[in-house]
Image (cartoon, helix red, strand yellow):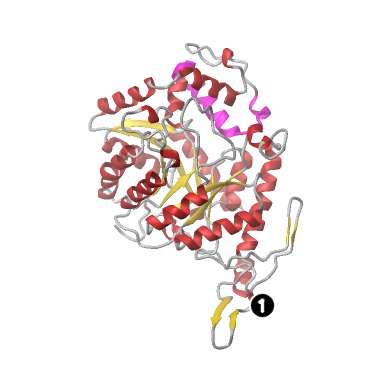
Amino acid sequence: MSPQQRTLHLNAFLMSTGHHEASWRLPESNPRASTDIRHYQNLARIAERGTFDSIFFADSPVIFGDVGRRPAGKLEPTVLLTAIAAATEKIGLIATASTTYNDPFNLARRFASVDFVSGGRAGWNVVTTAGPEAARNFGIDDQPAHAARYERAAEFLEVAAKLWDSWEDDAVIADKEAGVWADSTKVRPINHVGKHFRVRGPLNVPRSPQGHPLIVQAGSSENGKGLAARYAEAVFTAQQTLEDAQAFYGDLKARTVALGRAAESIKILPGIVPVIASTHAEALRLERELDELIRPEYARAELAKTLRVNPEDLPLDRQLPADLPDEDSIEGAKSRYTLIVELARREKLTVRQLIGRLGGGRGHLTFAGTPEQVADAIQLWFENGAADGFNIMPAVLPSGLETFVDRVVPVLRHRGLFRTEYTGSTLRDHYGLDRPANRFSELGSLAAAGA
């Protein structure tokens, strides 16, 4: 494989027993896996065996969905990553954290700490957190408006970056003979004063191995794409068709370039939920068996919440009602609302059929087929301006990840589309991204001026 050849980036999105909401009901599944650190360490080692760029954990400061429907408890992801770091050597470690319900200093410190613990493998998936349920856990009656959440997120990221740069790379001298541990002139307060935050700094953690942890973003609304184009280095997105994925890819790359960044500085990874078997018919059978385990009363209630309607308004064997709320009135998860409605309208799905489609990946592309067919689908999107790689979301864990690593990855490698071994040690190395210059150092100031 030529060093200059463009190759795939693969992230493993890990979720308890798998992304299919009924996966926990299978005989092979451990229904308490979501709080079992050994389960996640094993998954990370499987993904590392497949030379994945990274693993990723979603998170929200609220119980996700109905606890009667599927496992809902989850460990705090940055804590989880420190335990996984000790069990792995190369694979990147990405955790979700909200800019709406955290403060920049604490979060900047937490991710810098994970970057040190892992030897430079940390990434932060930046979310603004939709939904009134989360707001009420923080003494707020309702979620802040969509635009206000993204405005806060932008300033939050600016403050975090300043804090990560508040120590120069060579600030720590550790000169025992002279009795000087660090050069105090290279550790500076940031003195940030903005609309949402006043932060003096400096951070109480030196500059971490990557300089800044990798910044990931997952929103596809207009505000989400604007935030991604300015700050994100990897983007997780949900797209149902090649055409939609191409449009999103082209739009986000153009926005990124318009802000003075290189198109290659942002990696776009659509989600895919693969169900893999030796034959297409067998894969379809496995997918059908999973869908039949969905409890429709729970799934319909969750769909109704997403669509802002009553469950009684969604008869299972009819299509979605014509008078759904207008997209502009949705303040949380705008892009996912649009995706679900467009999927149902485009394919004329009944509510029962829509529930089945969403049960596998909550709006992400689901694909049942042989290893070669899965590789074909990935290659098609990768080579036709729709993706820089994929967010792999196994329907069932650990078996779905093992099958992908053992049967799909070899096909991708044989086609020259994916690495056979790691060539770097940090998450930025895996994604082919530069280590950021320090904005407060002389060299960093010159680099920023040039940009």
Picture coordinates of residue 4 (x, y %)?
Answer: 36, 60
Quadrant of the frame with the N terminus: bottom left
Q: Is residue 199 visible?
A: yes
Q: Residue at x 38, y 23 (%)?
A: 291
Can residue 349 be seen here? no
- Which residue matches tag 1? 185
Measuring from the top left, give residue 444's x and y in whole percent: 60, 70
| Above or below, comparing residue 267 to residue 289 in the picture | below
Q: Which residues are magenta?
A: 326-353
**Image height check: is 252 above or below 262?**
above
Question: Residue at 38% across / 44% down in the picture?
Answer: 39
Q: Position of residue 437 (x, y in %)?
A: 56, 67
Q: Examine the structure image and report whether residue 333 is included in the region drawn in magenta.
A: yes
User: x%, y% of residue 226?
Assistant: 62, 45
Question: Vertical placement of 181 versus 399: above or below?
Answer: below
Q: Is residue 113 left or right of residue 100?
A: left
Quick one: quadrant of the C terminus? bottom right
